[in-house]
Image (cartoon, rainbow, N blue to C red):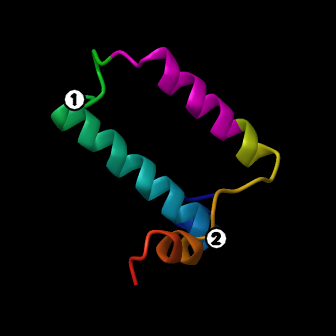
Amino acid sequence: MSAKAKVAQMTVDELKEIVGAAVEQKLVDLFGDPDAGITMKKSLRQRLTRQRKAVAAGRRGEAFDDVVQRLRLS
């Protein structure tokens, strides 16, 4: 099967993911990893771990409209 046929069988989302990954890799190749050498504080690592677990469990943060109203941004 030719490469053209494989691309033709992809969904739009699959193609976007492949193109996005290729662009990201090329940017890292050209400019380097912007996070290289940066150390993460323990508190930030713990917060990100809690957030990842909450999202995996289906819990989300505040709704955007609620935050706007709470902060009186509208």
Q: Is residue 11 magenta?
A: no
The amino acid at mark 1 is Gly
Whether tag 2 and tag 1 are in contact, CB under 8 A, the answer is: no
**Nearest to the observer: residue 38 or residue 50:** 50
Q: Which residue bears the numbered disc 2?
A: 11
| Range shown magenta | 39-52
Residue found farthest to the right: 57
Q: Quadrant of the N terminus?
A: bottom right
Q: Position of residue 15 (x, y in %)?
A: 53, 64
Residue found farthest to the bottom: 74
**Nearest to the observer: residue 35 or residue 23:** 35
Displayed quadrant of residue 13: bottom right
Q: Is residue 73 left or right of residue 63?
A: left
Q: Is residue 14 left or right of residue 4?
A: right
Q: Earlier in the sequence, mark 2 or mark 1?
A: 2
Q: How many marks?
A: 2
Q: Which element type, helix, strand or loop, lies under badge 2?
A: loop
